[in-house]
Amino acid sequence: MNSANFNACYCGRVADLLGLPLYPPPYLYTAGENISYGVNFAVGGSGVFKVLSNVSLDVQVDNFELFLRTDPYSKAALENSVTYVSVGGNDYLAFRGTTEAERLLYIERVIRGIQANLQRLYDLGLRHVMVANIPQPDCLPLFTEKNNWTNCTGETGPLINIHNSFLLVAVENINARNPGARFIILDHYSAFSRLLSEADEQGFTDGLKPCCTGTTNTTKCGDVDASGKWLYTVCKHRGRALFWDSEHPTMWAWHYIIDLYTKQPNYILLAGVPTLRDWLQNNNAAPEPTAALMSQPDLLSVAGQVQTALNCLLDKPNYSEALGVLQSFSLEAVLAENLGEDVTVFIPSNDAFAATDQAFIDGVFSMNKVNDVAAYHVANGYFDYNTIATVRPSFVISVTGEQLPIYYPLKGVFVGLGSQAEVVDPDLCVMPDEMVIHGIDHILMPHNF
């Protein structure tokens, strides 16, 4: 339960740490999904109060309570589960008070709201809860843009320091009053402070400047005009950026933060053990059904490979739509699970997206099937165009396990069931003996769609 966007990658890394083969599906799209590994109740823009969205923390916990009425988990499973709660940052971004009295009153209201909902989670059966405190908001590009992203502005410091101190006491009170409660604080403030101080030596050489920025003072990352033309630019070296846009850290920044929690002492509070990994192991926190933990995907070892692919596609304007999907699709996780193996990617052009039935695209997003469709376009093995033309395989195997047929009419090469798409830009991006990307003119639809 959190503000979804800021912490999305963090949630994924915790899922990797727990060895979950699937990331928890969103609450609204749990129908037909595997929920044995959890559910995500996060809502973008949410807060303790209804500040940037119409959903508050109360509503998220209400949704959780309604969900539990369907008896999805046993009492033992709830007690043995792990919950992540991160909230409050948006509340302070929306705060407009100016006096000390107004600040203190507002902080107290925020903390009361958090503590009340943490108590509700305990009453609903949860025992292992990770509560994130708030990093320094005035280091976000949203604030530092005014000084050309050179340094944190310091304008929100007093609010956040008081909030974090009060939050620590509130969580201590939860543990003291409730038998078996093992609620801890993830010290985002200290972790992000260390990241900022070590940014250069960790390879984050872009400083506080975001990777994705609007092309004018009135546009922002993700904006497009009526024709679909980008009104923003994206940096070529994402691994050097701390922030993706004006408010959200990059996945590489989150990799660093989660590694601090799992490997370095003093970044989790109230746990009684040095690291998050120790806390999870000591409290036997695991998904249901209990299974041997999978090895954590080695995301960093494949990050450069993915970065090279994204850099190549940035220079291909007719593939901007697919680039956006690829950035949200966890290609790193796919490659890490197949470490040492080569892959071939069939990537749809902008024309392919335009030619695809909009109802199908809307359905894919509404059913939370974007990753399934994207993964179908990635095949095991290195098949550059010369190999395809000379060996002429009748199919390749997608990383989803399905066969991806290849057809050879008198002219051209077609892929997908019933010759769904023609390879129109062979060898679009080539990383020899690692990855090859071919451009296609239609989106490939798995057989069950």
Image (cartoon, rainbow, N blue to C red):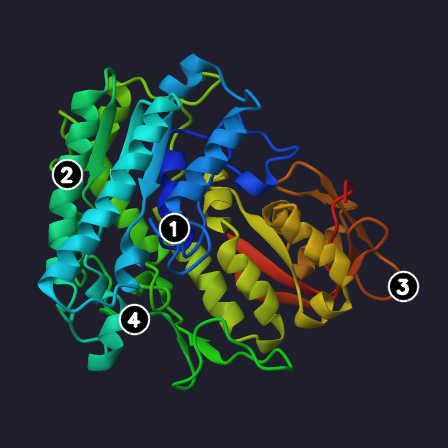
Residue at mark 4: 142
Residue type at mark 4? Answer: Leu
CA–CA distance between discs 1 and 4? 17 Å
Residue type at mark 1? Answer: Ser
Residue type at mark 3? Answer: Leu
Q: Kindly tell me whether residue 31 is visible in this rendering.
A: yes
What secondary structure is marked by label 4?
helix
Which one is earlier in the sequence, the residue at label 3 or at label 2? 2
Residue at mark 3: 410
Residue 299: quadrant of the picture? top left
Q: Are marks 1 and 3 in contact (CB under 8 Å)?
A: no
Establish if 147 lies above or below 208. Answer: below
Which one is earlier in the sequence, the residue at label 4 or at label 2? 4
Residue at mark 1: 3
Which one is earlier in the sequence, the residue at label 4 or at label 3? 4
CA–CA distance between discs 4 and 3? 55 Å
Which one is earlier in the sequence, the residue at label 1 or at label 3? 1
Q: Are marks 4 and 3 in contact (CB under 8 Å)?
A: no
What secondary structure is marked by label 2?
helix
Establish if 106 lies above or below 177. Answer: below
Q: Are marks 4 and 2 in contact (CB under 8 Å)?
A: no
Instruction: Report crowding for label 4: few under 14, some 14 to 19, many 20 or more residues within 10 A (C-alpha).
Output: some
User: What quarter of the picture does the N terminus occupy?
Assistant: top left
Dot label at residue 168: 2
- Which mark is in front, 1 or 3? 1
Residue depicted at x 38% and y 44%:
57
Residue 117 image position (x, y, % from top left): 33, 36
Residue depicted at x 51% and y 43%:
334
Residue 260: quadrant of the picture? top left
Residue type at mark 2? Answer: Leu
Q: Kindly tell me whether residue 242 is visible in this rendering.
A: no
